Amino acid sequence: MSGQRREWLKNLLGDMPGTAELAQALFYQDRPPTSGYKLERLSAVLPQWVQEADKARAVCNKPSEKRILLVGFLRWWLEYAAALGLLLYGQGYLPELAYVPYREWLGEVNKFDRRRQASLIERTFNPARQLLPLHNLSRPVSVPLPEKLLKRIEELTLIDVQYSRQRETLHLGPGGEDEGLYQLRWERNKTAAEAVYSLLSSGAYQQVIVPNGSIFEFGAVYQTARFLQVPVVTFEFGEQRERIWLAQDSEVMLQDTARLWLERGDLSLTDKEEQAIQDLYAARMGGELWKNFQRRWQASGQAGGEAVRTQLGLDADRPVVLLCTNVVGDSLALGRQLFTNGMVDWLARTAEYFAEHPQAQLVIRVHPGELRSVGDPSVDIVRRTLPAIPENIIIVPPESPVNTYDLIQIADLGLVYTTTVGMEMAMAGIPVMVGARTHYRGKGFTIDADTFAEYAGNLDVFLENPEFFSVPEEQALLAWRYAYRFFFEFALPFPWHIVGFMKDIKERPIAQVSSEAGMEKYGLAVRTFAGEPLQYGISEYVR
């Protein structure tokens, strides 16, 4: 049968109840559709996880009637949600799992294959069904959403497309290259929101748990839960093994540290804490791995500030302004705008400003993450804004081996959107102007503006007197204190990282995590998932 006829038949059968499910059971069994994904890894371990969760619950001292709705989407998040749900079951809660049966978030999937994938997921979860009931969020539910919630879903869908295209400028008009993707994401987000709205409106659930919460169906679930005022926890992972970011009734990718800083910001660092943050900073500068951090922050070691000044041809008689970009379209930058239309607009308008002010040198350090390809590279943004780039603007492209910390050594002023480098420049005693909502804005060691006029006015003041914004020692120490709280206390101890999850859970299985010793180490995060107030102040580095 030709591919065209096969698709025609699938579309026909997709509207007939039971056909896809029957075909999966009789002919395909554990084989997914071509647009789907296999679940053999989960199928192999799920029975063991169920046994461990059952045993943990049997000795649980305080079983709870709290019903918790978890969300899984994409194979790796579905695996993770299964383990997290069973861990919570073992601790006495009543978890249920909501899923969407898609392999990825970009491509169209016909109804027949979508239902086949859902049937495969349901079949795989058979050993856990008594412990972890399932809900398919891709199944249409006739529930009209309130206009205010629909507006939130529209805003989410725009961010989805920006994230997927890795560019902020979209072409959504009739025939536009982004129109189809927008419609796809709108339909999927709206369908998921309607399904969750129906589930949560019943009042049966006291808690929702969702990864990320800022994009795709994750964001649709988060926005719906917040609209209905159902408590929701979002979670993600940073650079550290055995640590997890958690946020209650907030998008975790906002990295909201307000309460952490309120509770812990006035506490001076102990000698051990100070040594820990200094050691981490030294590793970041040198491009080295450190303890359970699994990322190298620089591609090469340091050559020294003056060597880089010579390499880039910088004039020693004019101040150096270091602008560090985010990756265009990154979820840590999208939706964070304050006084521009986004990072692209902030970068372009800042470049225009310095093109008109040659008395300072602007060094634009493009994020090395752009090597992994973005739809609108920062280098192109600058060149599009300034076809003839003036001599006082120097672009350091993402592939450059120049160490960013060498640039910090010679910088007189730092400009950032949301990148963590801004915090590190403040730690080095460099005045930093922040262009967007980043977690360290407003913490007492950055220069914050609410309008572009105020931002440009601050640049004017700097150019007139580069010493005006000099950072006093106590302000730099404040930045160091904040960096320690962010890197070592914002993330909570937890046994499994999403990267290498199957290896992690093999080393630290549900039975071990559920034990008295496991709960002593990881119980704070487990209780936070279940809705108990988030607590800070735990770090294994200084015990």
Image (cartoon, rainbow, N blue to C red):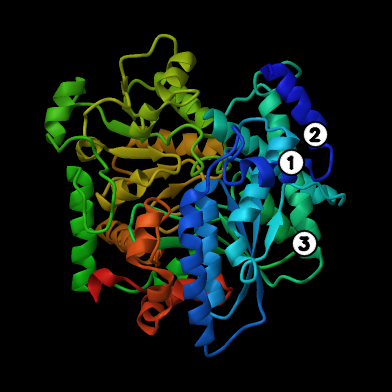
Mark found first going from the N terminus, 1 or 2: 2
Depth order, front residue of 370/527 = 527
First-in-chain label (1 vs 3):
1
Q: Are marks 1 and 2 in contact (CB under 8 Å)?
A: yes
1 vs 3, front mark: 1
Secondary structure of residue under mark 1: helix
Secondary element at tag 3:
helix
| Up-down relation of residue 235 to residue 285 (above or below) | below
Q: Is residue 417 above or below residue 289?
A: above
Q: Nearer the viewer, residue 437 or 62?
A: 62
Q: Amino acid at mark 3?
A: Leu
| 138 to the left or right of 29 | right
- Residue 364 in the image: state x and y as whole percent: 34, 28
Q: Residue at x 48, y 40 (%)?
A: 435
Write down the residue under mark 3: 199
Alpha carbon of mark 2 to alpha carbon of mark 3: how far? 28 Å
Q: 449 or 395, which lies in front? A: 395
Residue 243 in percent (x, y) is at 38, 62
Q: What residue sits right under mark 1 in the picture?
A: 20
Which image quarter holds the N terminus? top right
